[in-house]
Image (cartoon, rainbow, N blue to C red):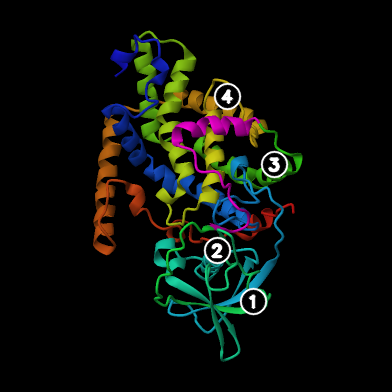
Amino acid sequence: MFRSCATLLHVCVILCRTETVVEKLLTNWMSICLYAFLRDSAGEPLYMLFRAIKHQVDKGPVDAVTGKAKYTLNDNRLLREDVEYKTLTLNVLVQGGGVNETQPVPSKVLDCDTITQVKEKLLDQVYKGTSFSHRPHAESLDLEWRSGVAGHLILSDEDLTSVVQGNWKRLNTLQHYKVRVPDGATVALVPQTPMLEDADEGGVRLWHLVKASEEPELPKHRRGSLRERERAKAIPEIYLTRLLSMKGTLQKFVDDLFTVILSTSRPVPLAVKYFFDLLDEQAAQHGISDSETIHIWKTNSLPLRFWINIVKNPQFIFDIQASDHVDAVLSVIAQTFMDSCTIAEHKLGRVSTFANAKADYSDGCCRYYADIRQTISASDQEMNSALAELSRVSAATHTHTHTHTHTHTVWPFTSMPCVSELFGRTELPGGTARALQVHQ
């Protein structure tokens, strides 16, 4: 690949895409070789970042239809409307869920949450410490309000009491049931009762906090120009302040993750050292002395090919629930990391919440590449021995996984222990929880 591309003008695109078999193999090889580093070092700060994002986003309204949230880093997914809401504490009981069914669990929700959002938050509290695949899902449960012995009422997103105006139907929230569900109310999560499907309501559009644009969705080839027009609009200062406040809350967790990824204070993964040395050798053999080109090769082979995918998709390695509003925040963080590992100047979008920190991250990336180059080279024998050991451990792990759960795959992340096994906890430590204070 280097021999065929080194004579071309665009040598910087090497390893940038996945158009060749070599590039696709590199993606899988790097992922498998970095499994131990992810498990032992980078996994915890990534998980804590995910938890911090989820904790913070859930403290404010999230539109169940559009996915826009009051607290986010992504200005395109920012809920700009001023939605009135208050926090409620519900005492939740669970039937047949393997938990103490007689002891109610106090759980905080928002009165503007849809019933499905309430169920998800209650499940997070009741099954705190249980991996996502081992707990009931919101779709399989009904939320039942209880008052006394005979006062039972099933709450749902849509029912006969839903507000319909023209061709718009609003999803039910706790505010909708406010007469029956006050602060401190007792609710229960019960197995869902099969019901007849509602008749097709042709032309009816659902909305939650704000009505989506009534304009038809543009085809994919025209969306780019629309995004450009949107980015030309100035964002009001009040929303910029909210974005920066969110950034300040998450800054420590982002710093912790980037520090672990770009640190040589602990042993650098052997595969990274081995492959970076290979890139240096190929550059020397083909007479490429431009340090920027070599930097781009390394960025394409590690941050772009591995870390960006992991940061944007923590559900690949943790047994957790993915959500659009958390993904929107992770995408901003992943893009910040990628920009920091790239030498070329980038045009900042309308809002770049990590613009001030980018220089520090970029310096850290340059030091990381330089420090790796100064370490003792990894021999072919060392790399072969490491791969043989990895193969042995992986085979044993997959055998155990196949025996006790379900069929295994070539991706070791799918058989990675759940977060409770990795870190001994799934809730935020006290200090972390205290650090996550929203500036209302």
Q: CA distance from mark 3 to mark 1?
A: 35 Å
Q: Secondary structure at mark 3?
A: helix
Q: Is residue 192 above or below residue 301?
A: below
Q: In the drawing, what numbered circle is on residue 244?
A: 3
Q: Earlier in the sequence, mark 1 or mark 4?
A: 1
Amino acid type at circle 4 is His
Q: Residue at x 55, y 44 (%)?
A: 215
Question: Is 25 displayed left or right of 213 in the figure?
Answer: left
Q: Is residue 428 above or below residue 1?
A: below
| Residue 157 in picture, x, y percent from top left | 53, 67
Q: CA distance from mark 2 to mark 3?
A: 26 Å
Q: Secondary structure at mark 4?
A: loop
Question: Is 11 displayed left or right of 265 in the figure?
Answer: left
Q: Which residue is mark 4?
A: 346
Question: Is 12 displayed left or right of 215 in the figure?
Answer: left
Q: Earlier in the sequence, mark 3 or mark 1?
A: 1
Q: Which residue is mark 1?
A: 181
Amino acid type at circle 1 is Val
Q: Which residue is mark 2?
A: 117
Q: Earlier in the sequence, mark 2 or mark 3?
A: 2
Q: CA distance from mark 3 to mark 4?
A: 20 Å
